Amino acid sequence: MLLLLRWVPLLLPLLAGSALWAASEVSGRVMDAQGRIVPGATVTLEASGGLRRNAKTDGEGRFRFAAAADGEYRLRATAPGLFSRAVNVALRGKPVVEDVVLSQLAEQHQSVVITDNTVEPEVDLRNEEVFNRTLFTRDDQVLQQLNAGINAGQHEGGGKSLEIRRFGFNLDHGGVNGGLKVMVDDVQQNQGTQGHGQGYLGSLKALSPELIQDVTIINGPFSAEYGDFSGLGVVQIHQRESLPEQLTLRVQGGNFDTARGFVAYSPDAARVDAYLSYEGSYTDGPFENPARYRRDNVNGNYTWTRSEGEKLGFRMLFGRNNFYSSGQIPQDLVSEGVLDRFGYLDPTEGGRVKLGTLASYYSKVRGNGDTFKADGFLSRSLFDLYSNFTYYLNDPVNGDAFQQHDSRLQQGLNAQYTHTHQLGSAPALLVGGANYLDNEINVGLYPRDGRAPAGVTTRAHARVTNAAGYAQENVSLLHNRLMLGGGMRYDVFRYAVADRVNPAEGGVEVAGKWQGKGNAAFTPSRKLPLTLHFNYGRGINSVDARGVVEQRDLPRLATTDFYQAGTSSNFGRFSVATDIFLIDHSHELVYIPDDGSFEFQGPSRAYGYEAKASVALSRHLSLNGGMTKVGNAYYRGGEFRVYVDSAPHFVANAALTMADWHGWSGSLRMRAINHYRLDGEDPSILAAGYTVFDLGLSRRLRRGIEFSVSMDNLTSRDYFETQNYFESRVSPAAPAISRIHATPGYPLTVVVGVTVRLWGRT
């Protein structure tokens, strides 16, 4: 079967657009933000000329409108305490099926999210409810909310980018060993040839959770739309175009000198969706060397609806953050009582970042239902990280402290056209597009005295361009019971490096790679709510430009072949999905901190299984969860087996969610990982696992005013977010020891806040 999937492209992950091939009416279900069905909801279908038709959902939350004449319609749903904004529906002689998600309380007028809500192995979704009702005290919590088998932890206890682990592989900061591609409104967040690691995700720190509309998660490289860094999945974050109220104000504070404020203005204007927001936050954290972590973010959007189905918009973002950190400290010294768990060895570690992005986007829905969209962006960032991993290992006199610098100009363009058509008598959907990304980078590594450079180790100017084109075809057969699709993508990279220390090591190299995609979904019987899924995709991750130019005999691109087979079922209030997977990497990449480069350590393989489930326990209470279990992850070839290290083989999450019970809403969330190997050959060197509970509650005090409390690490468990095994010397006279270095997780952190929303928009 795996060989067949490799050579016979089958189908793309199920798209919301597949609803075009259902029955000849407008139909669907109404659910609340937790995925519970809403019986008795009022659904309205309104024609552009004013004709209005109403329907009520049945006991399973389903609604149906008989076939209507071609034209433009607006679909909305309401229920006691719940509300959805109108959504445009275009009827072009084909049926439409839409599931409507009621996402907030009526007076808050939150935007509706429309999607196929059945849990699927390859696609997951989080809407704005997850982010809007959570008091975030640290930027890394945004990614932790996604769950979906993603294990993320702080590497230095503060403002540095998260270390990402998934499917048994350590992705460093998101860009190696397959990579996890993160997009914010089609702007790639992974920074290649970065001062601190390939695919660095630090720019996510400028993201304000209140502005998140929804998040789509693809569990592998199954969509031709995404290329570099997509081998182990894609996280596409969509921000709002406007906020439900004209004025939104949130203030919050907690222990460890934690404070945060958010304010946004969203004007009420005809044919315009817009906002301007500011977020400021500060925390010292639990560390003996206070984090002094300060963030400031300014975010704005302006969307002009030029005509029905046509939009032109502009976005802007400015962010900065400064922080100190405790770094990763030797765990043996903590166990011996020499260091506190929140202690430090070098008080000068930390960093500072400034970044800004200007973006524009355009979309047009044509009369035949075809869609064209295009967007572009220009981004500028300055990054300095002050680290000291090994202390006095290499230089017992001056120490091993170093500064990593990255000054970057990014430009990007994306275009996509979606065409509905027929293949014989079968409805089909063709998606084609192109991407272009240009990075101009001044990158360097410097020994330092305090935070002042004390020399030059490496310094280079790199320019990396990536151009790509793709196409994907999807077809519906057997009255929509069989969906087949296949896609192809080609990426070409140009690496140009001018080495300022060793000019002879500069140069220009070019690399390109085809990536095939194939997926299938089959529903054996309409009477049984069971769908079988088969997915295959090849993903790529690019390599640091300096390594490409300096080591011309090594491969320039690494590939990931991802095979997945699974099931999905939806039995009224209960949904479940399961799958098994096999992942082959052409090259495992390991970061070398001494010179800021990466080394290849051979091809690798991982296999395992996943399960996700969601159940509505009552109208106000729901339970959902998921787990990823890796059976094994190892290097292929060699005389004896060497295992892939530094990533857990078990990742689980669960949430018990309450919605609008006597004015209260909240969730009790759990996240857990198992202990895992830190050395591929010695099974006794292990990182400790953990299980952590978080609690969030909110209550409407009166119309437009909400009180919230958040308790992270509810049981105040002692645990470590990240652990790594390497050699270090903690003082000039101390011995060099190979040991585990760890970053502590925060203890119980309590934050309270008040949110005020005024002057609802029409």
Image (cartoon, rainbow, N blue to C red):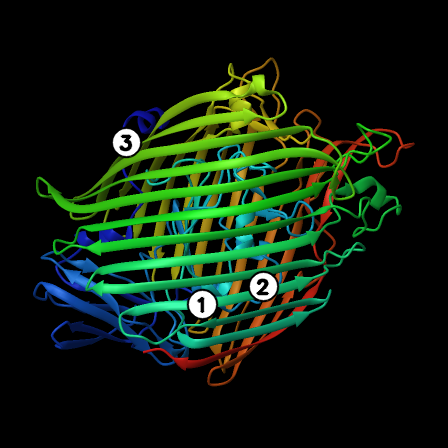
Given the image, on which type of amino acid does mark 1 rest?
Leu
Q: Position of residue 426 (x, y in %)?
A: 12, 43
Q: Nearer the viewer, residue 671 or 330?
A: 330
Q: What secondary structure is marked by label 2?
A: loop
Note whether 278 is above or below 401 in the view shown. below
Q: Position of residue 34 (x, y in %)?
A: 43, 65
Note whether 62 is above or below 664 in the view shown. above
Would you say residue 439 is visible in this rendering? Answer: yes
> In the drawing, does residue 386 fall left or right of residue 52?
right
Going 52% across and 72% down the picture, which residue do you hit?
A: 263
Mark 3 nearby-residue class (10 Å; few <14, some 14–19, many ≥20)? many
Which mark is drawn over residue 136? 2
Going 88% across and 47% down the picture, which residue do you hit?
A: 337
Quarter of the picture holding the C terminus: bottom left
Q: Nearer the viewer, residue 757 or 217?
A: 757
Q: Are marks 1 and 3 in contact (CB under 8 Å)?
A: no
Q: Which residue is mark 3?
A: 9
Q: Position of residue 511 (x, y in %)?
A: 41, 23
Mark 1 nearby-residue class (10 Å; few <14, some 14–19, many ≥20)? many
Given the image, on which type of amino acid does mark 3 rest?
Pro
Q: Nearer the viewer, residue 136 or 15?
A: 136
> In the drawing, does residue 116 fall left or right of residue 210?
left
Which mark is drawn over residue 276? 1
Q: Nearer the viewer, residue 688 or 353?
A: 353
